[in-house]
Image (cartoon, helix red, strand yellow):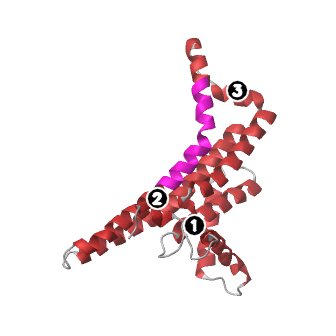
Amino acid sequence: MMNNLFLIFDPSTYIKLSLNWISSLLIMMLLPMMFWIIPSRIYIMMWLLMNKLMEETKEIIKNNNMKLMFITIFLFIMLNNFMGLFPYIFTSTSHISTNLTFALPIWLSLMIFGWLKNMNHMFIHLIPQGTPLILMPFMVMIETISNIIRPLTLTVRLTANMIAGHLLLTLLSSLKNHMNIIMIPSLLFIQIILLMLEMSVAIIQAYVFMVLISLYMKETN
């Protein structure tokens, strides 16, 4: 019996090494599909998804190489979110350490690039247009704090959304021992609906992560 409900997110194994983190590398198994003579359905779906994302980001990002970088981040987060929906597979994106590994270096590189290359543009963003003179010091302070906490908000948003759905499914599954056998089919139906909702959340959160980072990059350029 679990002492803590959050133990379901612990990267625990039977040996001393935490091999659960290797689950993130399972995505590499989806990459060599281009070597098939006839494209598989998964390859066609990935190709259509990448083309759709390229069209969505063309107004924000002009460089195709940068588009591919953000699409790679989207695919990595989305596939890791999906793997967490399968039984006995570790969800790496439900940990702050994994998400912060993506958010902090990207945000830090954008800030360094912006302040070194476009310093006047970055100062303009600290004071919105039309701000009264008396409120300018406070707006600079507020905008500076909002810029500093951006990697934290990116990390916590993705982590909280991944944890919330898994906890709800775990709580509902623990009710089966205290329910009448007649009510179990309704419980299964509710869990299926929640699982479908979690699939949509896995895609939406990866898309939100990619779009927010691309918008941050647009502010610095």
Residue lying at 63% horizontally and 48% vertically, measured from the top left: 213
* Quarter holding residue 42: bottom right
Q: Residues within 10 Å of mark 2 (few under 14, many from 20)?
A: some
Write down the residue under mark 1: 80
Q: Secondary structure at mark 1?
A: helix
Residue lying at 60% horizontally and 18% vertically, measured from the top left: 136
**Residue 191 horizontal/vertical position (percent):** 34, 70
Q: Nearer the viewer, residue 22 or 220?
A: 22
How many angstroms separate mark 1 from mark 3 (CA)? 37 Å
Q: Secondary structure at mark 2?
A: helix
Residue lying at 71% horizontally and 49% vertically, measured from the top left: 105
Q: Nearer the viewer, residue 38 or 109?
A: 109
Against 13, residue 59 (above or below) is above
**Residue 40 horizontal/vertical position (percent):** 62, 83
Write down the residue under mark 3: 123
Write down the residue under mark 2: 163
**Residue 87 horizontal/vertical position (percent):** 47, 76
Give the main secondary structure of the magenta stretch: helix
**Residue 183 horizontal/vertical position (percent):** 21, 74
Do labels 1 and 3 touch, CB within 8 Å?
no
149 drawn magenta: yes
Do labels 3 and 2 touch, CB within 8 Å?
no
Numbered circle sitting on residue 38? none
Q: Residues within 10 Å of mark 3 (few under 14, many from 20)?
A: few
Marked residue nearer the N-terminal end (2 or 1): 1
* Quarter holding residue 177: bottom left
